[in-house]
Amino acid sequence: MKVVHLNPGDQTVAEITDEIQRLLVDGKRVAVTVAVEDELLSPQQAADRLGFSRQHVVRLINAGELAGQQMPGSSYWQIPAGSLLAFEQRRQAARERADAFSRSLDDLGAPLE
């Protein structure tokens, strides 16, 4: 997963377009998210993005795995888009580490059980 942060005046849009095109030519599936980094999402919006239930998103917030802020005097939560993207990056990195570890065990001839 590659996350690119753009600031006003950046000239990297062409680079991003080129990278997307390269991945598509290589037969890869590509998901592109365009978000204002400090945009606030509801737990349901975050859940839809992550493929989780709204309740699971609130559990992730309570466990400190996902940054969120509770509205004063309310039970309503808001999640910064940047926090959601960081969570997705951590999940992807963990998957990649697990895959590399599994490949290493295969290379060593470790039994399946």
Image (cartoon, rainbow, N blue to C red):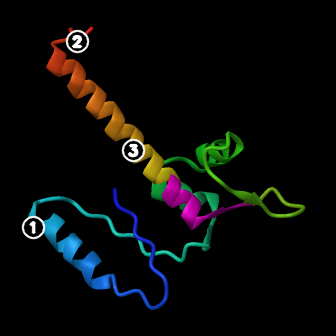
Q: Could you give the CA–CA distance between mark 3 and mark 2, rounded to whole angstroms?
A: 23 Å
Q: Could you give the CA–CA distance between mark 3 and mark 1, rounded to whole angstroms?
A: 24 Å
Considering only vertical position in the picture, is 30 above or below 104? below
Q: Are marks 3 and 2 in contact (CB under 8 Å)?
A: no
Type of amino acid at the residue the image marks with label 3? Ala
Magenta stretch holds residue 80 = yes
Residue occupying the point 52% across, 51% down? 87
Q: Could you give the CA–CA distance between mark 2 and mark 1, rounded to whole angstroms?
A: 35 Å
State the image quarter where residue 103 is shown: top left
Quarter placement of the N terminus: bottom left
* Residue position marked by numbered label 3 in the rendering: 93
Residue occupying the point 35% across, 35% down? 97
Considering only vertical position in the picture, is 100 above or below 73? above
State the image quarter where residue 6 is shown: bottom left
Give SS at disc 2.
loop
* Residue position marked by numbered label 1 in the rendering: 25
Give SS at disc 3.
helix
Camera-nearest residue between 20 and 12? 12
The label number, if any, that marks residue 112 in the structure image: 2
Residue found at the very far right of the displayed protein: 73
Type of amino acid at the residue the image marks with label 2? Leu
Q: How would you rate the neighbour count of disc 1 (Cα within 10 Å): few for under 14, some for 14-19, many for 20 or more?
A: few
Type of amino acid at the residue the image marks with label 1? Val
Question: Is residue 48 left or right of 109 when viewed as pictured?
Answer: right
By secondary structure, the bulk of the magenta-drawn segment is best described as helix
The image position of residue 61, as x and y in percent, is 67, 47
Q: How would you rate the neighbour count of disc 2 (Cα within 10 Å): few for under 14, some for 14-19, many for 20 or more?
A: few
Magenta span: 77-86
